[in-house]
Image (tube, rainbow, N blue to C red):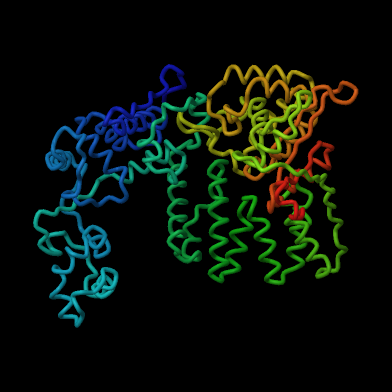
Amino acid sequence: MTTFDPASVPRTADLDNPLYYLENMETVVRWVLDHHGDLLTGPEFRLLETFLGLETGEKALLTRLVMRTGELFRADKLAYPELDSPVSEILHRLVSADWVETEPLLDLDQLFRLFTLAELRPAFADTLKGLGHNRGLPKAAMKRVLSDHFSEARTLDQWFDTGDARVVRLQHMALFDRVRLMFFGNLRQTWSDFVLVELGYQAYEQVPINRESRAFDCRSDVDCYLAMQACRDQLDQEVPASEVWPQVPGPVTNAWLAGRRDRLLLELGRQAERQGDRELALTALAGSGHREARLKQLRLLERMKRHREAWQIASQWQTGELSDAERQGLDRILKRLAPKVGEPRPALATARPINEWQVSLPRPSAGSVEWAAAEHLNQPQAPVAYVENTLINGLFGLLCWPVIFKPVPGAFFHPFHTGPADLTREDFVVRRRSDFEACFAALRDGCYRERILDTWHGKQGLANPFVVWPALSEALIELALDCIPPDHLEAMFRRLLLNVKEHRSGFPDLIQFHPKGSGDKPGYEMVEVKGPGDRLQDHQRRWLDFFAREGIPASVCYVRWQENTGEEMP
C-alpha cells in the first residue's frame, strides 16, 4: 500500500474537458487501488486494473452507467455526445469484455420502470382484456393487475416485441459500490458528489492516509459496513424492525464502525417503537451509544410506566458530561420521575437573567437589521464587527487546526475532505482529548496568539469546517485576541466540543470591542440583534445562559424601527 506523499496527491479534473468525469473516476479507482488494494480480492483488483486499461470511450460510458441509478438501462436511450464512437459500438465492445450483459432477466417492476405507459399498453392489451380489465388503466393500476399474473422474471424479448429497444445490465456494480465506500467512507454520497463536481476551486489540507489512519483495517470491516448499510436500506424501505434486527452485526472493536452501528441501532429503535415493538426498541436503544439514544430510551420507559428503571438510568447518566440540550432533557425527565418513584425532585439549574435592551433606529433603505444595529453601535474607540458564528468558531479552528486534521482512523478517506468525517460523531473529542488539552494549554501559557496567527498565515484558504476565510481578516483576529481574555476563549471552546453539531451555531450576531476598556484593560461585548417580531431561539438562549454563568459579556439588543414605535418588546 502506498504511503502519503504530498507530490502524489491526485490532480482534479478541469471542467473544460468534456470527459472530466472520467478523469475524476480514474482518480477514485487509482486511489482505492493504492490505499485499499489489500482489502480487495485478487479478481477485484485485476478487474479495476482492467477498467483503467480500457479505451477512453469504453471507460467513459462505463463511468456514465456507474453514476446512474440502478444496473438496468435502456440502450436505445443512452446518448453521450462527448464519446468518440456511437454508444451502440462501445456497448458491443463492453459486452465482449463482460462489463455489460445484453439479455438480463427483468421482473415486472423492472419492466415498468424502464418502459413508458404508451409502450406497455399495446404489449399487455390482450392480457388485460382476458383478465377483464380495460386497456386504458393507469400505469400503477396496470402493474397491480398484472403482478398476480406474471411472477417470474423474463428476458425483454420474452415479455414483448420491443422493436429497436434493448435493455442492458451493468456488471460488477457491487464492486463499484465497494470502491465508493472505501473512497468516501460512506454510501450516502453518490458518484456525482465527486465525479461531477469541480474540485479544483477549493484547496484542501493534505492529511497522511496510511494503514494506521485507515477506517477499514481489513476486508471484514468493509463487509461489516455493507451489512449495516443493507440493514439501513431495509429500514428506509419500512421493512419491520423485527425482521432487520437479526441481520444487525454484533458489537465491533473498530471504533469508527462502532459509531456507525450506534446510529443504526438508534434508527432501528425509532422504527421499532413506531411499529409498536417497544421491547425491541428498548433493546436497540440500550445497545446504542449514540447521544440521542439515551433520552429516547428514558422517554420510552416513562411511557411504559417503568419509572424506577428509568430513574436508575437517568440518575447514573446525570453524572456524565452532557451538552446543554442533553442536560435540559435529562433534568425534565428527572423532575417528572421523582414523585413517581418517591424521590426528592433534583435541584434544577436556574437560568440566569439575560441582559436585554432596546434601541429605536431609522429603517434603512437596504441591508439587514444586524447591519443597521452594527452601524449604530460602531464607534472609533469601540468598533463593532458582524461575526455571528464565524469568529469564535474560526479562532477555535485556527488554534486547534492540527487536532482537527489529525489522521485518526475513520476521519479521512481521500485528499478532498473539508474536515474530518467524524466531526459530529459522539467520539470526535474522546479520540483526540489529549490533543485538545494541549491546545487549551496554549491559552494558559500565552503562546495561543502566535499559534493562531501563524496558522492564519500558513493555512490561508485551505478548507476547515470551523473557518470561514472571508469573515476572518488578520485585523479582526488581532483585535479579538487583544480584547477577549484567553479564559473566556477556553470556556467557549470547551462548550463547543461538548456537542460540535449543536454548539457551532447560536453565537450572538455582533461583537463590540473596547481596546481601551476601563482602566485601560481591553474588553468586549457580544450582542445578539433581534428585529421587530423576532425572538430568541433555544440554542441562542443556551449560549446566553452559558455566557451569564461564565461571566462572559453578552446582551440582546431589540431593534425597533422609528416608524413602528407602537410595537412592544417581546
Seen from the viewer's position, the closer of residues 146 and 373 is 373
Q: Residue at x 53, y 53 (%)?
A: 264
Q: Residue furthest bottom?
A: 132
Image check: 223 left or right of 71? right
Seen from the viewer's position, the closer of residues 339 and 310 is 339
Q: Is residue 357 above or below residue 236?
A: above
Task: Using the rendered image of the protein, determine whether residue 193 is visible from the camera's viewpoint.
Answer: yes
Q: Position of residue 365 (x, y in %)?
A: 61, 40
Q: Is residue 364 above or below residue 406?
A: below
Q: Residue furthest right?
A: 519
Q: Residue at x 37, y 32 (%)?
A: 28
Q: Residue at x 56, y 55 (%)?
A: 265
Image check: 56 left or right of 543? left
Tally the numbered discs: 0
Query: Where does the N terminus fall, quadrant-wise?
Result: top left
Seen from the viewer's position, the closer of residues 384 and 120 is 384
Q: Is residue 35 above or below residue 459?
A: below
Image check: 370 left or right of 92? right
Residue 524: quarter of image:
top right
Q: Is residue 116 above or below residue 18?
A: below
Q: Position of residue 257 (x, y in %)?
A: 53, 44
Query: Where does the C terminus fall, quadrant-wise?
Result: bottom right
Residue 547: quarter of image:
top right
Task: Using the rendered image of the protein, determine whether residue 321 is visible from the camera's viewpoint.
Answer: no
Q: Residue at x 17, y 69 (%)?
A: 121
Q: Position of residue 360 (x, y in %)?
A: 75, 44
Q: Position of residue 562 (x, y in %)?
A: 72, 46
